[in-house]
Amino acid sequence: MTTQRWNDERADLDEDWRKALQDANLAPLWDVLAALVTPTPQGRMEAAAWSYETVRPLLMKAGELISAARAERRVLILENPATPGESRITDTLYAGLQLILPGEVAPAHRHTQSALRFIMEGSGAFTALDGERIYMEKYDLILTPNWVWHDHGNETNEAMVWLDGLDIPLLKSLDASFAEHRPDRGACPPGRADGDTRERWGRNLRPVRGVAPDRTANPLYTYPFSEWSRTLTAMEASDPPYPHEGYRLEFRNPLDGGAVMSTISAFAQSVPAGFHTAPMRSTDGTIFVVVSGTGTIMIDDREFALSEGTVVVAPSWSTRRILANERLILFSYSDRTVQEKLNLWREELLPAD
Ligand code: 1HN
């Protein structure tokens, strides 16, 4: 019989050796391997929801307490309840609600984080991208791809609120954050004519000459609700709802047909009144915003009420089902494009129960 030279206890109990490992910045893999390489995603993120009626008065109070100029951006961060203080709603994404009051300017800056804005309230304030003003209407999607100068202004007489979606936690984990501010702390000087990029890129045309052929960064910054909602309506008129999603569209980059930005995918969706979607899950933790309608989303064993302005986060690999009482229109965003580029994205369509 061979002598057993190893036993688990010795590795666990040899305290001097354990201490020497620590001092040398070493650690045994076998202690942690099972937790590192899990058979399925075992993230720490929780499903959560924020109703607009809860958030709005707290945001308006922030409007009394601090100016947009002083705050740089007057935003309440939607924090995943599992990770307070980490400015993340999923492992890779950030969400916040931003308020800009009449007469205010949020000064220009640029950064390597990519941002989207989804307008929740108000009409006619603008975000300027490299000095080009883009006027905002409710439920428009507006992009700020990385390293584009941007400032916001409100020359109307009503408050304007939008959801900011950024890839902040992803860039933090890559440690690839750079940012610059205008020395005068003001807005960018006027650039292209107001709305110019939409005129150029929003009509399914591209110039034959004058744009480098290897350019793939999305030149289109705006996806107005008045247009994207019509595509959903057209689909509803002639196609049956898809069992797992109702009707779902991806906002796309007109140059390559891909995701709107290099790190964030964005979607529009509708679920007809009375429809229950079949359960599904995917590896892209997703943030949903209710545009209109009422219903319920079930995420694993939890249930959240949906009404206009509700924001919900469904973590990676959580099973989700949507029940529409009245026809629901939803906006959503996730890191799906990142996972697809890395050959990591998976989904599972489960049978209706
Ligand atoms: C940012 O640039 C904006 O431009 C909003 O409105 C929120 C959160 C973190 C980092 C940059 C904006 C942000 C942000």
Image: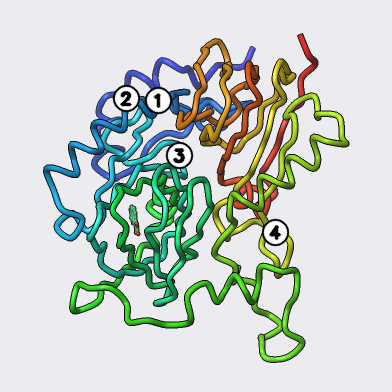
The residue at which mark 1 appears reads as: 51
In this rendering, the answer to whether 39 lies above or below 224 is: above
Give the Cα distance between marks 2 and 3. 24 Å
Q: Nearer the viewer, mark 2 or mark 3?
A: 2
First of labels 4, 1 by sequence position: 1
Q: Nearer the viewer, mark 4 or mark 1?
A: 1
Q: For the residue marked with disc 1, what is the amino acid? A: Ser
Give the Cα distance between marks 4 and 1. 31 Å
Element type at mark 3? loop
Quadrant field for ligand 1: bottom left
Judge from the rendering whether residue 20 lies leftward or rightward of residue 209; answer left or right. Answer: left
Q: Which residue appears at 18% of the width and 36% of the height? A: 61
The residue at which mark 3 appears reads as: 91
Q: Observer-nearest residue: 36 or 20? A: 36
Q: Are marks 3 and 4 in contact (CB under 8 Å)?
A: no
Q: Position of residue 113 (x, y in %)?
A: 42, 60
Element type at mark 1? loop
First of labels 3, 1 by sequence position: 1
Q: Is mark 4 within 8 Å of ligand 1?
A: no
Residue furthest to the front in view is 157
Rendered image: mark on residue 161? none
Element type at mark 4? loop
Q: Position of residue 312 (x, y in %)?
A: 48, 28
Q: Are marks 2 and 1 in contact (CB under 8 Å)?
A: yes
Q: For the residue marked with disc 4, what is the amino acid? A: Gly
Q: Are marks 3 and 1 in contact (CB under 8 Å)?
A: no
The residue at which mark 4 appears reads as: 258
Q: Quadrant of residue 59?
A: top left
